[in-house]
Image: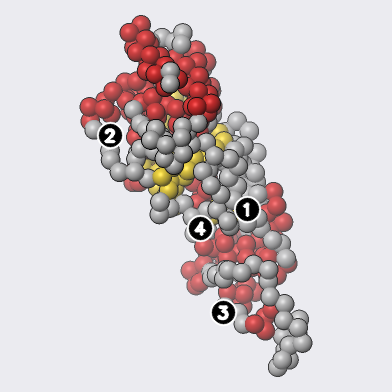
Amino acid sequence: MKTGVANLPLHGGRAPPWLFKRMRLLAGAVVEALVYEYGQEEFLHRISDPYWFQALSCVLGFDWHSSGTTTTTTGALKAAISPEVHGLGVAGGKGKSSRKAPLEIEKDGLVLSLSTEKIEELKRASRMAAKVDNALVQDGYRLYHHAIFFTERGEWAVVQQGMSETYARRYHWLSDRVVSFVEEPHSAICAQKKASSVLDLTAGDSRENREVTLDLVRDGPSHLMRYTKQRTLFDFSDQARVVRPAELSMPRRHEVLPVDIGKDGIRTLKMAYEIQPESYEDLVALKGIGPKRIRALALISELIYGASPSWKDPARYSFAHGGKDGYPYPVDRDTYDKSISTLKEAVEGAKLEKKEKYEAIRRLGRYTAV
């Protein structure tokens, strides 16, 4: 289950080596405390919660809007977590490191004594989480960071991030209640503000569109060719064959929506036709079925059969704490306190040295004292 998305403005800067070293040590202490007190599964639940993840990044040394909050916090966790010590594995990261996830899943999976079947399931979960947020939720954020955390029982959580021109949006996934990767996988998507139009093919309202798209692919791509060409006003008329249509009925949507599959896309669809995918999820998993082709198929399905997909941004609410300088708005103390109390539960009573524990709680207390 995807449990949240965070929208954060991008600010410059990077964590210096002296700070990252301490981040790794404190992150390791928090992970050890969580696993000791609540178990590995609870660690995944916390990681999949954008509130808790953001609180952790602040405790490690970030302002809420600092550059690298997601990537550096994830990097610190990856450096701190040991499969032998914690019974947890971490794979992936930023940029090129994200593409190492399959090999790292295999490496840590062997240390955790996971079966070949479990390792393959984790690799598929990693791949599908990225594919869904990049192709099925077309919100204008291009993924550049992907990390998967998993236990010795094969449970997992994913933290990945996409970037637009001015914002980064973070996506959290949790394996506990995943029934389908392609329908309503979110329990919450958090955003500072919603976009006016987002193609969300994971929405329940997009179910008919997904079913029609699958049927079109199973029927073969040859009859789709004419729908990928430039359209004229006559295409919107109920009397398209006459010189002057008696009535012109334009669609309600104003923007121009490209329907473009291309020659490479047709070859990909022919391959999909030969494979005959059993489900929409299997179709999405195919190599070569990316955002542009998914979008084109969705629009063709709407055009032919009126199976409209959802154009609502799946974001539900805002979760940013606010800025210490009042920008873009004053700190939301109630939300901040909730984040801090969640982290305190992980720190209190855990196996930390007395001095480290005292310093961690004292540091948290300074945020609630004003």
Q: Nearer the viewer, mark 2 or mark 4?
A: 2
State the residue in front, 93 or 341: 341
Q: Picture coordinates of residue 292 (x, y %)?
A: 52, 62
Secondary structure of residue under mark 4: loop
Confirm or deny contact between disc 3 and disc 4 (CB under 8 A): no
How many residues crowd around disc 2 within 10 Å: few (fewer than 14), some, or many (20 or more)?
A: some
What is the three-letter code of the residue carrying label 4?
Gly
Residue position for label 1: 312
Q: Which of marks 3 and 1 is in front?
A: 1
C-alpha span from label 2 to label 1: 36 Å
Q: Picture coordinates of residue 212 (x, y %)?
A: 70, 61
C-alpha span from label 1 to label 4: 20 Å
Residue position for label 2: 15
**Mark earlier in primary sequence (2, 4):** 2
Confirm or deny contact between disc 2 and disc 1 (CB under 8 A): no
C-alpha span from label 3 to label 1: 26 Å
Residue position for label 3: 230
Quadrant in which the C terminus appears: top left
Horizontal placement of 12 versus 4: left or right?
left
Confirm or deny contact between disc 2 and disc 3 (CB under 8 A): no
Q: Picture coordinates of residue 53 (x, y %)?
A: 46, 30
C-alpha span from label 3 to label 4: 21 Å
Residue, x 47% and y 43% (percent of image)? Answer: 7
Residue position for label 4: 290
State the residue in front, 203 or 367: 367
**Mark earlier in primary sequence (2, 1):** 2
Q: In this view, does 61 lie above or below 1?
A: above
